[in-house]
Amino acid sequence: MDASAEGQVTHAEHRDYAGAKLGMWIFVFTELVLFGGLFIAYSVYREMHPHDFHHASGELNVTLGVINTLVLLTSSLTMVLSIVAIRLRRKGQSMLFLGSTMLLGCIFLVNKFFEWRAKFHHGLYPGSEHLMARPPGERLFFGLYFGMTGLHGLHVTVGVTVMAFMMALLRKDRIRHDDFIKLENTGLYWHLVDVIWIFLLPLFYLAA
Amino acid sequence: MSTAVAQALPLPHSEPSFYDQSKRQGILAWLLTTDHKRIAILYLISLVTFFLVGMTLGVFMRLEQLTMGPTIMKPTTYNALFTLHGVIMIFLFVIPGLPAVFGNFCLPLMIGAKDVAFPRLNLLSWYLFMAGAAIAITSLFTGGGPPDTGWSFYVPYSVTTSTNVTLAVLGAFVIGFSSILTGLNFITTIHRMRAKGMNWMRMPLFPWALYATAWVQVLATPILGITLLLIILERLFHLGIFDPAIGGDPILYQHLFWTYSHPAVYIMIIPAMGAISEIIPTFAHRTIFGYRMIVYSSMAIAGVGSLVWAHHMFTSGMADTAVIVFSLLTFLVAIPSAIKVFNWVATLYKGSVELRPPMLFALAFIFLFSIGGLTGLFQGALAVNVHLHDTYFIVGHFHYVMFGGTGFAFFAALHYWYPKMFGRMYKERTAIVAWAHIFVGFNLLYFTFLVMGVQGMPRRYYDHLPRFHTGHQIATVGSWIMVAGLLMMVINLVRGLFRKTTVPANPWGGVTLEWTVPSPPPVENFEVLPTITEPPYTFNPPAKEQA
């Protein structure tokens, strides 16, 4: 490994793209492991209660789930386009695409909100009397559903917030065609959020 | 607090050290610093403070056990004390321990870099650590009172108890995040910032140990994160994932908890082993024996150590097949640790051993860690485990590893790098007297635990039977001797800061890179970044170019 070149500069100017990306990838790994704990819980309980999971899954709104998947996948595309645009020195375009990504992220959250609200209306939430009257596997299914989509939704919120900061940096030319690692790392994070959702969709919505 | 350190060190050198140079003045020079050396000192002050608090709680517990029946507190207080003692010592002292203090200070110096890869992230780690600590401390005085679950927060009790578990767990979660960021920072630093010519097999052993540790931190800590998060969700929203009343399985909690918390003991011990691997060759004046094997065994411990967690659960009722597999893996993980012990001992052979304070602590480490490691094997054996589970034997064992191992290595490292960090020297004679007290008191205290454990004394009990009375009294007297030694050590180190004599760049005759720069080092560490042409620990020709 060559470290000498960037080592010559002082603290403040130290800039190492490969290093910054390596750090981000490691962080992405930690996020995967974080969700990994929940995926393990899911697999254990699905193995224990296959029929309950199957039955409970039928109550989720597949249409909303698929729409949200399309929304997130599109947002990953606009994220990539935003990075490409800034590399081609098209600041306006980059901001437009980043804004679209944020908008799509928000649409996802709004959809999620309506979905959750419908579940609450039906009395399908952890600790509710209605749910406690059902078999244990279904209770666990909805416990995991709210836990995992909730944690994922939190990540979407964090992602959109980070993008708002990136937008400000873009506007102030702190992210430029020759210095876009922050935007690229934000993109990495956003793709992670996307990938996790791609696993959540079949596990919850398509298990029926 | 930190300014006191700065005032104690008025310009010892013609060349300005990192204490003298900062963009900001006063306390802000510390609180907003991104210099890895200043951050290390912030950690040092925080950790020593937490250690002293945890130690005090331990002393109270020993006082309670001095007599049968109530001595100085109520049983509920005792429950809170062992929980707090565990949480503070584990999450606030031993886990951050060597990486946060000596890793931060020495890693860039030892690999010939000017700082870590992400200096601002490094400062953020310290703030997260302090925030987590503050949250944990707040949990003591608010809500339903201090948590009484033990540091492992086992469900279902942790979900049903009215004490303030939610906040304490949130504190541990935030501290875990700090640990992840430090690990991430170190991995990137080691990959990207080694000096020219320092290939992997020319890297000193402490950075190697930090590297192995960092991977465990990064890969295991998120599991703790999700586990603790689930406790909070269970308490607030009753998801039911661990609640048998809803359909969940408490054993799953134990699996998830130990999937992190067993690797966490390697987060605690691997850097300790790394520091010992630095100290032994310096004071034996001889190259380390089996450099490559020490490197490989660090990585092996990190790898195999991630696969042994369920040996904490032999009596939990999990499948017999799993029990046997985990027992086998537990025995396997002892091999790389033993390799290191043999390598250190072999390094001493035909060396010219100099018994100065860091070396004494290091030798005590080898002795105590060996006892800790071997008693661990007792518990890996299935039949014996059933007898020893939840007894004082376990408490004795992990104090031998955590305190006799990591704690002694921390003190060894502190005495070893103290002159580099502060440009001053403590009184060596006092340090040796303190060491002797700690060593004797330690064995009196914890060896008695081992014996009482075999005889059947259960852990976490407020009271004891008459037949354990003598043992408890011996242990309590041991704790007094040990605490006397610890206080002597801390006072000696603090007073050393105010002594007038300064120290040269290389007071011990070490050969790793940190000894080539002035004590204390300048802000930029190296005027010219070094180029490495030979393996570390090359003592022949002896101690070249002493600055």
Image: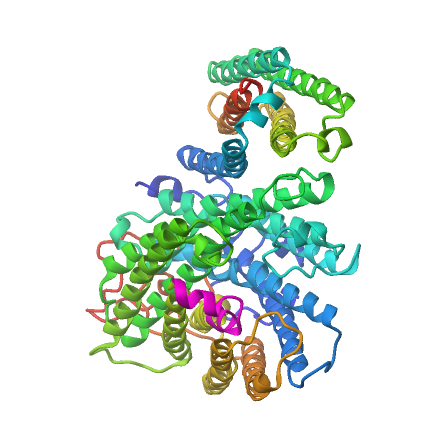
Q: Nearer the viewer, residue B485 or A96?
A: B485
- Give how far across and how far down residue B17 sits, in percent: 50, 62
Does residue B304 appear to the left or right of B293 in the view shown? right
**Which colour style is shown?**
rainbow
Indicate whether A151 appears above or below B451: above
Residue occupying the point 53% across, 22% down? A194
Q: Where the N terminus of chain B falls, by quadrant? A: bottom right
Question: Magenta region: which residues?
Answer: B382-398
Does residue B536 appear to the left or right of A174 in the view shown? left
- Give how far across and how far down residue A191 sits, in percent: 50, 23
Residue B99 in the magenta stretch? The answer is no
Residue occupying the point 28% across, 49% down? B200
Instruction: Tell me the quarter of the picture where residue B164 sits.
Output: bottom right
* Res B13 seen here: no
* Res B541 seen here: yes
Residue occupying the point 62% across, 42% down? B230
Does residue B172 appear to the left or right of B183 in the view shown? right
Q: Nearer the viewer, residue B66 or B419?
A: B66
Indicate whether B162 appears above or below B462: above
Residue occupying the point 74% across, 80% down? B72
- Give how far across and how far down residue B95 sits, in percent: 52, 58
Indicate whether B118 appears above or below A160: below
Q: Nearer the viewer, residue A107 or A3?
A: A107
Residue B395 in the magenta stretch? The answer is yes
- Give how far across and how far down residue B26 sits, in percent: 67, 59
